[in-house]
Image: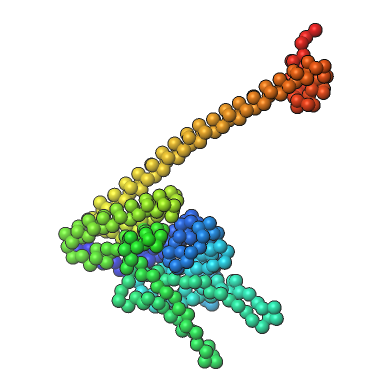
Amino acid sequence: MAKKLDKKQERDTAHIFDLILKQLIRLSSVAVIQFINGLFGTNHPLDSTVDYPNTETVSRKLRKLHSDTIIIIGGVYAYHIEAEIGDDENIVVRVFEYGLAEALRTKTLSEDGSKISIKFPNARIIYWETTKKTPDEVTLSLEFSEGEQYNYKVKSFKFLEHDIKELEERKLAILLPFYVLKLRKQAVSAKTSKRRAELAIEMKTIVDELVMMADRAEASGLVSEADKRIVLDHMERLYRELFAQYTEFKEGDVMLQDRILTYSEEAELRGIEKGKAEGKAEGKAEGKAEGKTEGKAEKAFDVARKLLSRGMTLLEVAEIAELPMDKLQTLVPRQ
């Protein structure tokens, strides 16, 4: 029976998931905007700008806090995404802390100085895995000294409760790597090799569906070819992180590696073919340009001959026909 992951391994895995998410939300602008629209239910144009503000802050304990999960669309709309593998009671505090740092960075002051306005980014918490305790919405209650109270609410997105088709409909292609979590808990709790082998077959089917979805996402323009290769690379990385300890899951990892290698080779071949096609096109264009240039030069010489036959001087013809004197002299018969 496989040994269950200890707390340190759980933290290490969570850290890897966090790093990969932060890399994926820096894919092409179109892919990121599709992701924001799907996660927040917005409808930002796909040609909007995507910016990542510097959100490094210093805490009261003089520790640097980093949050590159804040995204600004179109220079106006700010979004903050945090993700957790399990339930974390402090996550809403962290979301608020980072949101406050961004709000203070963009604060505005009224003309008379009596009012300071700060705007928090729209926030979501993504729960990769959920339990019965996982809330649909997390609330941080802010209480002020004069008795005023404000509830800061953050909605949850329970990732694995959505099937692959639904993720595709919501255009959340950049989150595909994390779907390999689907059978993680079952693999950890499996008591026999036979059961893990059954799960490995099921996992292979899931991976096939994910790869096909990635293909469709590229074909429909949701992600670029480069985006898809990064998504698949991270999918294989997370698959290995979660299932490397189980020999029964080795075939799925090999299959993913083969698919990624195949895509890389195909992309390289397409690049070579594209280069050849561009070279041919450039050659044709140059040939046409040269032909046009030669045609214009021939017409200019025809004009020059007629003008010279009418008794005009070489200097006059050179100015009219816009031809150099040394070329015109070849048209004058030697005495």
Asked where in the image residue 330 lies, by quadrant, the reply is top right
Query: 75 above or below 217?
Result: below
What colouring does the structure picture have? rainbow
Classify residue 68 as left or right of residue 305: left
For the point 35% across and 71% down, the residue is 86
Query: 145 above or below 98?
Result: below
Classify residue 329 as left or right of residue 222: right
The x and y percentages for residue 102 are 55, 71
Q: Give the mark count.
A: 0
Asked where in the image residue 172 lies, by quadrant, the reply is bottom left
> 121 or 64: nearer the eye?
121
The x and y percentages for residue 295 are 64, 24
For the point 38% across and 42% down, the residue is 265
The x and y percentages for residue 273 are 44, 36
For the point 50% across and 75% down, the residue is 97
Q: What is the quadrant of the N terminus in the image?
A: bottom left
> From this viewpoint, is residue 17 visible?
yes
Residue farthest top in this picture: 335
> From this viewpoint, is residue 23 visible?
no
Residue farthest bottom in this picture: 146
Classify residue 149 as left or right of residue 212: right
> 168 or 5: nearer the eye?
168
The x and y percentages for residue 41 are 44, 67
For the point 48% across and 64% down, the residue is 43
Query: 78 above or below 291?
Result: below
Q: What is the quadrant of the C terminus in the image?
A: top right
Classify residue 259 as left or right of residue 323: left
